Image: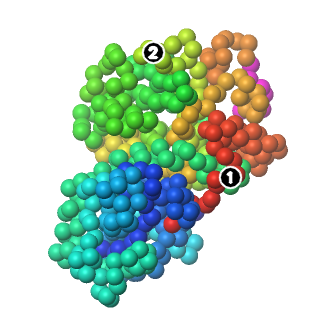
Amino acid sequence: MNNVWQDYTPSEKTGKLCYQYCSEQSVLPIRDVLNDHKKGFKAEPNYETATYNWYSNCNQPSVRAAVKDGLSHILFITKYTGLNREYLGRYFIVGYYEIGWITQVGNRTAIRAKRICFVPIEKAYEVTDERWQLINTNGQTLRLENLRSATQRIKGALLDEIIGHLDGGNAIDDFLYEVARLKSEYNPFDGIPRGRIFIINVGANTSSPLQSPLFDDGRFEFAPIPEYAPIDSNKILSFADLRQFNYPDQPFLALYSELPLSPDAKVHSDPEFLTFTYGDNINQKSNLRDIRVGDYLFFLSRLVPFSDTRFQHEQAFFALVGYLEIAEDINDPNSSMFTSPAFVRNAHVRRWLANPSSFYKFAIFKGSTRSRRFRYAVRFDREFVENVPLLKADGSTWDWDRTTELGIIGSNTRTVRMYIDPKSKDGLKQAEKFWHYIWESQKWNVAGRNQKSSC
């Protein structure tokens, strides 16, 4: 995949109308993530990467025309089919991209937004018959078949009215949480992925003030570490800013009956599982330098069983909590891409934006739309390691007799490295066992529900 993005400067403030299918399984007017309309698992518009047409061919005539003519915005219109029955069957403009970058992916044109706005249905801009006559210029009636091929351009006072209306209700975080949750329900692969598998140990450890709770049903919450180089800036998140993944309407700190830190303490939320990025310091010895587009970076974290409002610390274990399918890696300190909604949530980018003069060498790895934050923890224990098997860098097996299982796993995963190369001898067999273990733990059907992501 070509990921060389070019800066884009519009020549006129004009919006291009594009249609999206609406999910039936959310109150929010999000794209059809779970194939409710039997048109495929929709990847566009891709809020996670702030892109349109990067992963699939969608409304290409409109996108090409918008770029060719130097238009500034893509406006997304839908027929609402979500869970709020009051709005069923009505038509709304639910969000927009302000175009900031463009690229070519094969023979299609893709865009990336420098600003992204999506709103709950009650805040959306309803396209009534009367408003449709202002938008439409060719006499078509307001019907689904006409909207799906909509190519209308909107400018002037009407565009300002629509954008101003949407800006007043921007809820992109809600969209990201909802999409991440729904995506965790299905397997995005048609077969065994052939990318190399890297594993890195992240999140709370025994010395962290907060632990990552594992619930009785196998779900969990990921506790990030405190910011290790705090900067007094509102660009840096605090623990009070975090939400729960399983219940996004609840603050993350509500899980803890006693807080060993101030809610205002700055947090190093990395990896982050909304726009799927991971950042880290890079030096000549770092194995992160070996990661390339198409590889898989799995995140290993220490979880503590949590029931009856308390932690069972003696039962703590390691688990895989998610992964990135690497779509981009950026380590250019002058990259304008760091200002894109696709990257600004990363802790390293936040720190850099807060104080560019303190810049240090870091890289940001961006996950594709097939990246996942797991719904259920994938237990990473001696049985997992030996059954795959996972070996040391020198090809030898792990020594399980030195200390506790937890200590051995922690010691062997202290630094990131590549564990499986499907193209090596026995590598494909290892990859098959590894991935099937993931699929079974998530209760994903390996072959049944899979369809390629589509527009």
For mark 1, what is the residue?
448
Q: Residues within 10 Å of mark 2 (few under 14, many from 20)?
A: few
For mark 2, what is the residue?
308
Question: How many marks can you see?
Answer: 2
Residue 262 forms part of the magenta stretch? no
Number of the label disc, if any, that sits on residue 409: none
Is 104 placed above or below 439 here? below
Badge 2 marks a residue whose secondary structure is loop
Spot the residue most to the bottom.
Answer: 138
Q: Is residue 72 visible?
A: no
Amino acid on which disc 2 is placed: Asp
- Left or right of 418 in this view: 353: left
Viewer-nearest residue: 8 or 23: 23
Badge 1 marks a residue whose secondary structure is loop
Coordinates of residue 374 in the picture (x, y in percent):
54, 38
Viewer-nearest residue: 138 or 269: 138
- Left or right of 135 in this view: 414: right
Viewer-nearest residue: 407 or 329: 407
- Give the CA distance from mark 2 to mark 1: 37 Å
Q: Main secondary structure of the magenta part?
A: loop
- Residue occupying the point 29% across, 86% down: 137
- Residue occupying the point 29% across, 30% down: 240
Is 302 placed above or below 269 here? above
Upstream in the sequence, badge 2 or badge 1?
2
Viewer-nearest residue: 208 or 79: 79
Coordinates of residue 443 in the picture (x, y in percent):
63, 39
Coordinates of residue 37 in the picture (x, y in percent):
52, 62
Task: Give, as a single range, the part of the protein colored magenta.
Answer: 393-399
